[in-house]
Image (spheres, rainbow, N blue to C red):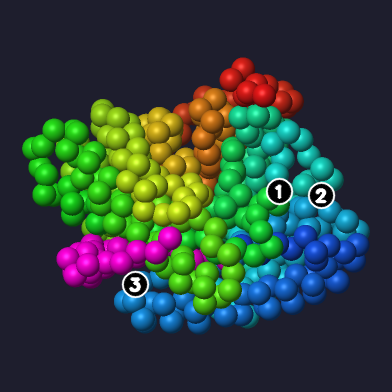
Amino acid sequence: MSYLMNSSEILQTIEMIGQQHLDIRTVTMGISLLDCADSDLTRCGEKIYDKLCRRAERLVPVCEGIEQEYGIPIVNKRVSVTPIALVAASCESEDYAPLARVLDRAAHAVGINFIGGFSALAQKGFSESDLRLIRSIPRALTGTKLVCASVNVGSTRAGINMDAVALMGRIIRETADIDPIGCAKLVVFCNAVEDNPFMAGAFHGVGEPECVINVGVSGPGVVAGALRSCRGERIDVVSETIKRTAFKITRMGQLVAQEASRRLDVPFGVVDLSLAPTPAVGDSVAEILELIGLERCGTHGTTAALALLNDAVKKGGVMASSHVGGLSGAFIPVSEDAGMIRAAEEGVLQMDKLEAMTCVCSVGLDMIAVPGDTSAETLSAIIADEAAIGMVNGKTTAVRLIPAVGKTVGDRVDFGGLLGSAPVIPLHRESAAEFIARGGRIPAPLHSLKN
């Protein structure tokens, strides 16, 4: 599929880039590491390093060339790899943290921003390799700069692995006690997808090609700009305006994806048409919701407005690309969205409302700072709630919580860069420890039986 842009569309694109924060949030190269398996951990690491450097050595220069030629900002250049729990399954080692250091060294060598895939898929149970990887996560994330990790603990077809949920609460707690920033690179999923280009949850699924290019677009500021022109209009007009804008944003993503694929001689995978905010003023999903008619994001009506936004983004974007995938919708990472930060600081946006919003948007409870003394059991209970939303609704949900060690409700935590900052928000004090301690597996819902 190819597109020709007329002069009007070119001028609109220039305005969107220059004034409304439109960018390509990421070009992510997925690389299979299945052929790097080895019983010796050191040899496995050497194979991984060599393959990553060979496959991704041109990724950054090619993306920079596209930026210069088309004037389109590409904020991040990233790599996702086969879940390391699969690659390292035959290794005779209890500690996979050395492989995380190999990934980090390779990421620095090729100049990318992040590498994802220090991951395990444990939705129905653990392999020995899954357990080794999960137990290595605190050392892996706090001992590296660019490595991201994820664990899938549930799915609509398998139910929820409550033993994995309980373990991940302890892993988040342990990681935070070493260095809370490590938790910003750790996602706990239900219904994880294989072609997600966004960090921290990206990994290269086993059903993917040997190597592939996936692109993640953004553009909350562009949608907000369009909505300013239809103040007072009926909801139908709001929806149509968002759809048309999402189409324009996704067309640009398709163009970049095709060019990167052609120049790297790597198959094009998908365009993820998510609205991914940044801490910059004017690049906020919360601002879009407020332009729809809410005094502040988090008040009554927020879930309905977000459902409208998410649906319109998907409908508009899907017509603009030959292959849409990943997560595709609206993200609500609290620390990475100026409007969400403001609403949380004012006490309007709290955990229960955020949880309700995740029922109708992409992913879930994202980049939320919680009190530093939050127990592992409470963290696990939050994961379980979010996984249940994903399992029952057949959608991807995730949790990225940061226990702010030494801080309490109302304090502020700065993560730096695109990770932004966030106020520490309150949680319920009542315990769910007995529920989490039961273990076992929550059965899949009846509607999972589709065969």
For this orientation, the residue located farthest to the left is 232
| Residue 154 drawn in magenta | no
Q: Along the line of sight, which residue is nearer the eye, 71 or 180?
A: 71
Q: What residue type is labelled 1?
A: Ala
- Secondary structure beneath disc 2? helix
Q: Which of pointers 2 and 3 lies earlier in the amino acid sequence?
A: 3
Magenta-tinted stretch: 1-29
Q: What residue type is labelled 3?
A: Ile
Q: Is residue 74 left or right of residue 51?
A: left
Residue 252's place in the image compared with 367, above or below, is below
Q: Which of pointers 3 and 1 lies earlier in the amino acid sequence?
A: 3
Q: What residue type is labelled 2?
A: Ser
Residue 68 at x, y = what percent? 36, 82
Split into 4 quadrants, where in the image is the N terminus? bottom left
Residue, disc 2: 129
Do the numbered discs 1 and 2 sit on residues whose CB atoms are within 8 Å?
yes
CA distance separating discs 3 and 1: 35 Å
Residue, disc 1: 120
Q: In this view, does 406 lie to the left or right of 94?
A: left
Regarding residue 358, the answer to whether it shows in the image is: yes
Residue 229 at x, y = what percent? 11, 49
